[in-house]
Amino acid sequence: MTFHIVTLFPDSFDSYFKTSIIGRAIADKKISVKFYNPRDFSKDARHRVDQKPYGGGPGMVIEALPVVKAIEKAKGKKKKVKIYWLTPSGEQFTNAIAKADTEKYKDIIFVCGRYEGIDARVKEVFDVEEISVGPFVVTGGELPTMIMIDTMSRQIPGVLGDIDSVEENRNAHPDSYTRPEVFMYKKKKYSVPEVLVSGHHGEIEKWRKGDK
C-alpha cells in the first residue's frame, strides 16, 4: 500500500517514519510513503506558495495551483485513489474508516494544510474527502496524517506480525501488567491484580472482556 503525502514540510515525518513498527513496515515493503512538496511546483523564483487571503484577515493561504499540481503528480494515472483533505471541520476519523480504506484502496493521498489553510478551489478540481482526527486544531496536517497512516498500517496483514495484535480484533482490557508481580515505591506496594496470577483462565478472560 502506498501513502502519498502533499506537504510543505516532508522532513517533519522523518523521526516517526524511520522508527518502530512503521519504520519496519516501510523497510519490509509492506507499505511505502511518497512525498510531494507544492514548492516544487511553484513558478516563483524563491518557490514561494503562500499569499494573503482574499477578504482580509490574519495569516497567509497556500496557493491552489502548486497544490493541484502536487496532487496531480501523486495521483498519476491511477484510477482508484482516495484523497484526504486534512481539516478540523472534516468527518471524524475512526478505526472503521482505517479498516475500510486498507481493504478498498492501494493508494491514499493526504493533503496537508498549513498557515491559514489551502485555497479551497483545490477541492473543485479533485474529489476529496475532508477528514479530522479530533475536535481540536493543530499547526498543520502533518501530525493528523501520521496518526492516520499509523492507524491504517496496523490493519495491513504482516505489519504487526500477528493480526491478533490489533487490539480492536481481540478482547483487550485497557490495562496491562508485567513482572515483577509486586514492586515497592515510597514504602507502598503496587501489585498485579490477583485474577491475572490466579491461573484461572475463565476469570482472566472475563477480566479481559471487562466483565464483572
Image (tube, rainbow, N blue to C red):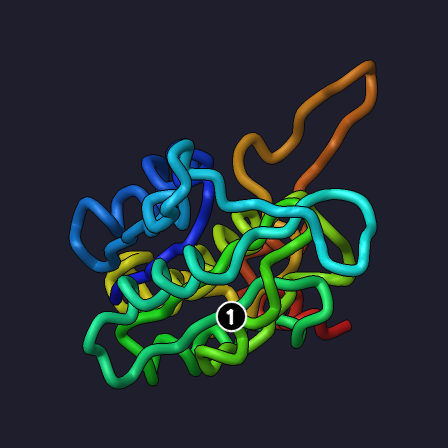
Which residue is drawn at the image coordinates 24% and 55% (left, top)? Answer: 32
Which residue is drawn at the image coordinates 27% and 63% (left, top)? Answer: 73
Q: Position of residue 164 (x, y in %)?
A: 38, 67
Going by the numbered disc 1, the residue's amino acid type is: Val
Which residue is drawn at the image coordinates 50% and 45% (left, top)? Answer: 49
Position of residue 40 relative to residue 78, above or below, is above
Q: Please, which residue is most extreme toward the top here?
A: 186
Residue 209 or 142: which is nearer the viewer? 142
Viewport quadrant of the N terminus = bottom left
Q: Position of residue 206 (x, y in %)?
A: 64, 72
Q: How many marks?
A: 1
Horizontal arrangement in the rendering, residue 186 relative to residue 207 (left or right):
right
Is residue 164 visible in the rendered image? The answer is no
Horizontal arrangement in the rendering, residue 106 relative to residue 99 (left or right):
left
Viewport quadrant of the C terminus = bottom right
Crowding around mark 1 (Cα neighbors within 10 Å: few <14, some 14 to 19, many 20+) is some
Is residue 117 visible in the rendered image? The answer is yes
Residue 19's quadrant in the figure? top left
Residue 153's quadrant in the figure? bottom left
Horizontal arrangement in the rendering, residue 160 relative to residue 97 (left or right):
left
Horizontal arrangement in the rendering, residue 133 relative to residue 58 (left or right):
left
Q: Position of residue 200 (x, y in %)?
A: 56, 63
Which residue is drawn at the image coordinates 35% and 62% (left, top)? Answer: 69
At numbered mark 1, what does the secondary structure look like: helix, strand or loop? Answer: helix
The residue where tag 1 is placed is 122
Residue 201 or 132: which is nearer the viewer? 132
Position of residue 200 relative to residue 53, above or below, is below
Q: Position of residue 36 (x, y in %)?
A: 33, 51
Residue 182 or 85: which is nearer the viewer? 85
